[in-house]
């Protein structure tokens, strides 16, 4: 009994419980929102021509899409399928959601990783640079740049970048059919470069800001003054003490952004024709493919939660104080 | 009928669609033969913005589905430049004197992609399936007057109508009535299309591309390109980039600005008209519009030319109700051919609202690229005579829902059009029409005219009847017909023999060659 109570209150068990509840909530919400939005698969497929279908045809279509069943039955039926590993079928392509996701997810993960790499390569060094002379020219310039990167919408940035490269250099690898990393690594990386840059630039901004703020905050902490007084060399002080501590909030921010990217960088995937999970969701949404939207959103939510969990764990590794508490 | 651009509805007559265009130039002289630089082993890459949603001909509604399926399947009849039916898989039918029996003779030696012979049993099977109430056929309405289909011998198909219907043959030119093999089920065809068109299905990567290969045995001639790849590029600007770099050979744009940006040294642009038309639908039964004078005031206050110039950047032609070249209305034949604010005010006075009234106009950004701009242009013009317009800009799902429920006063819409005026308007303006409640207007005289119009197969007589229909509609300001939009095909210069046509199909694209 005591063991049980202890297990139930263990932080990890509690987190897993929260995860399950969160995912259930997400699935229910997605299900309901999809039904509240006007239109169903029939009007999505036929538009106003749906009015020309005879009542028999509509009945037959409703049965085909499973819309004739009560909402509770629809939800429980789908949920039951998910629990037994059946995520449903896309009625347009006749593919199972599992197959579709297995094809789309690696592309999204690759794009997310590349974008994060770009963002870290830009954000951290520039953040350090900005923090080195607070209030001075290089600080203001970097801050201004990050503000700009943050406020330019990514669809605009994407359009500008791609039409500039096309018009100036005649270079637009995304016009070719998409190749995965295994099919053609060279072309794949070319195709990923533009979206990764666009996403990386917009994510670099919060990382830069976080890095800068964290460094400035830590620099004025007592333990740094103590270390400095004890004669710790500047270089060691900066890397071991300041940067390492500053990386804690940066890790959190990176994790958050990564989780967000795994949700499918919808705009970039759409503009650059990357067949990732964001585009899968978008297309399914416009076609009102209920099973696909519900399952894909659930998968995205699950990834987001997992990434958050892993970020927490990484946080514990970097900062021993978290472990102690 | 309005359609949304993302999920266009419809497919009327020779089809709806926007691609309006299509292709194949100068084929009259050169036929499908390859030019000197043409590469018989080349691949024509056609950029489309969305994955086709349906792959079985009779269920097809989206523009992309129709573009792809028109390469794979052949309908019984083809069309000429004026959208009039011509011989296709079958010769033009022999029609009995009472107009009830249509006898078709099929071409010999036509095969499906799987090698099996296309005969009258396949035609009967296809038509019976479309007419089956349980099938999900969007093309079922073309067969509304069909009583039975018989296949007395392998080359002969006899269709018996329950009443004369001159618009019947037009339905047989649509891809959505394309002939499928009788032994294959809809489920099989959904993943493995099998038709007798110029190309045959090779492979499909969902949301990325569909690849077709040349049908060496195509009954009408040898297709120009060895392969056709429909590549899905969802974003317009990306499509422009892909055209400029030559990775895509052809694409259709409805937005004139985008089409302009796509022009470069490597491309040529053809602008084409279309059967579709943009219209301000006035629901004549709605409280604010039930007085004909109120509707006429709206008609007179609108400058169609200004709507084209401001909202569609000049890319359109003013139109009357009927857009088909064979039966076209004179766009100037209406109470106010151009904007006439004095007359508009007179009508307002007659309607008992000399200072104007409040009108709600619904539209949707999801309809087509200039829909909201058109609503705004109309709003500004009506404001000049005191008609205060509130624009309801809706999500396309909401728009479709309210449109179908006839829950609006006025709506901006893009309708697909049809080669046959009966197909185009009987459903709106006759009391038994599917969309009569949506239109809110009909009369005994109109009903009589529509009945006469399909009772004769004589084209000249029909034209006279439909010009009366057209006149009745504009004189009563059933709707305000604005313009037929222009569409733009941007082609790589290496593409030859593409003919721009005013029907929506890519039915003649097979003659195009790539170098």
Image (spheres, coloured by chain):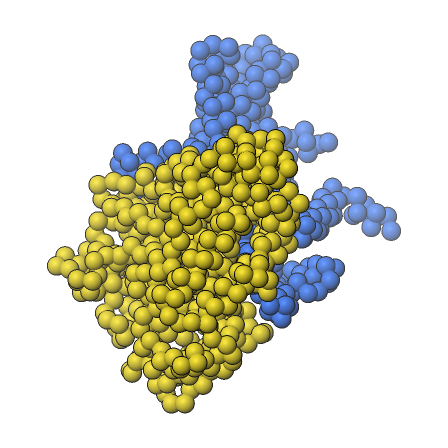
Chain colours: A blue, B yellow
Residue B203 is at least partly visible in this image = no
**Residue A68 on image: x %, y %:** 68, 65
Side of A289 relative to B58 (left or right): right
Side of A217 relative to A135 (left or right): right
Marks counted in the figure total 0
- The residue lying toward the viewer, choosing from A210 and A251, is A210
- The residue lying toward the viewer, choosing from A235 and B43, is B43
Residue at the limit of the structure toward the left, as seen here: B36
**Residue A173 on image: x %, y %:** 33, 45
Q: Residue at x 43, y 60 (%)?
A: B466
Q: Quadrant of residue B75?
A: bottom left
**Residue B332 on image: x %, y %:** 40, 46
Q: Residue at x 50, y 27 (%)?
A: A150
Q: Quadrant of residue B316?
A: top left
- The residue lying toward the viewer, choosing from B183 and B96, is B96
**Residue B399 on image: x %, y %:** 59, 48
Above or below, B419 against B218 in this view is: above
Above or below, A124 against A19 in this view is: above
Above or below, A82 against B234 in this view is: below
Residue B142 is at least partly visible in this image = yes
Q: Residue at x 36, y 48 (%)?
A: B487
Residue at the limit of the structure toward the bottom, as seen here: B153
Side of B398 relative to B244 (left or right): right
Above or below, A203 against B267 in this view is: above
State the quadrant of the C terminus of chain B.
bottom left
Q: Residue at x 53, y 40 (%)?
A: B298
């Amino acid at each position: 009994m005591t063991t049980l109570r202890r297990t139930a209150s263990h932080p990890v068990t509690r987190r897993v419980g929260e995860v399950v509840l969160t995912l259930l909530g997400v699935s229910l919400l997605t299900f309901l929102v999809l039904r509240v939005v006007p239109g169903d698969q029939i009007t999505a497929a036929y538009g106003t021509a749906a009015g020309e279908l005879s009542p028999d045809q509509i009945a037959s279509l409703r049965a085909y899409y499973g819309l004739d069943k009560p909402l509770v039955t629809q939800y429980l039926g789908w949920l039951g399928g998910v629990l037994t590993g059946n995520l449903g079928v896309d009625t347009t392509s006749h593919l199972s959601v599992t197959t579709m996701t297995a094809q789309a997810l690696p592309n999204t993960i690759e794009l997310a990783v590349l974008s994060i790499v770009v963002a870290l390569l830009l954000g951290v060094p520039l953040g350090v640079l900005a923090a080195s002379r607070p209030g001075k020219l290089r600080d203001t310039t970097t801050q201004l740049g990050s503000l700009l990167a943050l406020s330019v919408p990514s669809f605009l940035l994407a359009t500008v970048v791609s039409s500039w490269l096309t018009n100036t250099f005649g270079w637009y690898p995304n016009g070719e059919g998409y190749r995965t990393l295994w099919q053609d690594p060279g072309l794949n990386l070319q195709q990923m470069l533009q979206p990764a840059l666009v996403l990386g630039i917009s994510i670099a901004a919060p990382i830069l800001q976080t890095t800068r703020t964290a460094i400035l905050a830590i620099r004025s902490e007592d333990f740094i003054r103590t270390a400095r007084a004890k004669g710790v060399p500047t270089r060691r002080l900066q890397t071991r003490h300041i940067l390492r501590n500053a990386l804690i909030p940066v890790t959190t921010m990176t994790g958050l952004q990564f989780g967000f990217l795994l949700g499918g960088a919808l705009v970039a995937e759409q503009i650059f024709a990357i067949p990732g999970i964001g585009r899968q969701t978008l297309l399914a949404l416009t076609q009102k493919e209920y099973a696909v939207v519900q399952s894909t959103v659930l998968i995205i939510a699950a990834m987001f939660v997992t990434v958050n969990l892993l970020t927490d764990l990484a946080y514990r590794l970097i900062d021993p104080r978290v472990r102690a508490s | 009928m309005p359609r949304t651009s993302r999920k266009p509805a419809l497919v009327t007559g020779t089809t709806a669609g926007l691609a309006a265009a299509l292709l194949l130039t100068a084929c009259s002289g050169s036929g499908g033969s390859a030019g000197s630089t043409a590469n018989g082993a080349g691949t024509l890459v056609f950029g489309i913005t969305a994955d086709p949603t349906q792959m079985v001909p009779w269920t097809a509604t989206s523009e992309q589905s129709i573009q792809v399926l028109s390469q794979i399947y052949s309908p019984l009849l083809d069309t000429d430049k004026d959208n009039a039916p011509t011989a296709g898989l079958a010769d033009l039918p022999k029609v009995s004197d009472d107009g009830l029996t249509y006898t078709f003779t099929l071409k010999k030696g036509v095969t499906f992609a799987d090698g099996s012979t296309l005969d009258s049993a396949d035609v009967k099977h296809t038509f019976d399936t479309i007419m089956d109430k349980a099938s999900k056929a969007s093309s079922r309405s073309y067969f509304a007057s069909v009583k039975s289909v018989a296949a007395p011998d392998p080359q002969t198909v006899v269709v018996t109508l329950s009443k004369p219907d001159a618009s019947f043959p037009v339905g047989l030119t649509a891809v959505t009535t394309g002939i499928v093999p009788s032994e294959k089920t809809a489920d099989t065809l959904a993943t493995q299309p099998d038709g007798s068109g110029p190309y045959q299905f090779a492979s499909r990567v969902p949301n990325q591309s569909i690849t077709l290969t040349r049908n060496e045995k195509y009954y009408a001639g040898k297709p120009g390109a060895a392969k056709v790849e429909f590549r899905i590029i969802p974003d317009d600007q990306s499509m422009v980039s892909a055209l400029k770099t030559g990775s895509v050979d052809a694409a259709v744009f409805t937005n004139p600005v985008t089409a302009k940006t796509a022009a470069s040294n490597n491309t040529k642009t053809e602008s084409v008209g279309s059967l579709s038309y943009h219209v301000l639908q006035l629901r004549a039964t709605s409280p604010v519009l039930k007085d004909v004078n109120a509707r006429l005031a709206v008609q007179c206050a609108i400058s169609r030319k200004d709507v084209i110039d401001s909202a569609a950047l000049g890319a359109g032609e003013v139109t009357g109700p009927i857009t088909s070249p064979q039966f076209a209305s004179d766009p100037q034949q209406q109470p106010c051919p151009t904007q006439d604010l004095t007359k508009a005010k007179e009508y307002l006075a007659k309607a008992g609202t000399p200072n104007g009234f409040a009108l709600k106009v619904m539209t949707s950004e999801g309809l087509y690229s200039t829909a909201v701009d058109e609503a705004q242009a109309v709003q500004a013009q009506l404001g000049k005579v005191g008609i205060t317009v509130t624009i309801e800009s809706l999500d396309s799902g909401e728009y479709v829902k309210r449109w179908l429920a006839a829950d609006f006063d006025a709506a901006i819409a893009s309708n697909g059009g049809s080669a046959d005026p009966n197909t185009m308007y009987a459903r709106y303006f006759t009391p038994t029409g599917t969309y009569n409640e949506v239109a809110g207007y009909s009369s005994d005289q109109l009903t009589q005219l529509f009945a006469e119009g399909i009772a004769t197969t004589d084209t000249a007589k029909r034209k006279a009847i439909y010009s009366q229909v057209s006149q009745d509609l504009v004189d009563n300001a059933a709707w305000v017909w604005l313009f037929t939009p222009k569409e733009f095909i941007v082609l790589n210069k290496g593409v030859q023999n593409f003919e721009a046509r005013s029907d929506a199909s890519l039915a003649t694209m097979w003659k195009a060659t790539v170098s």
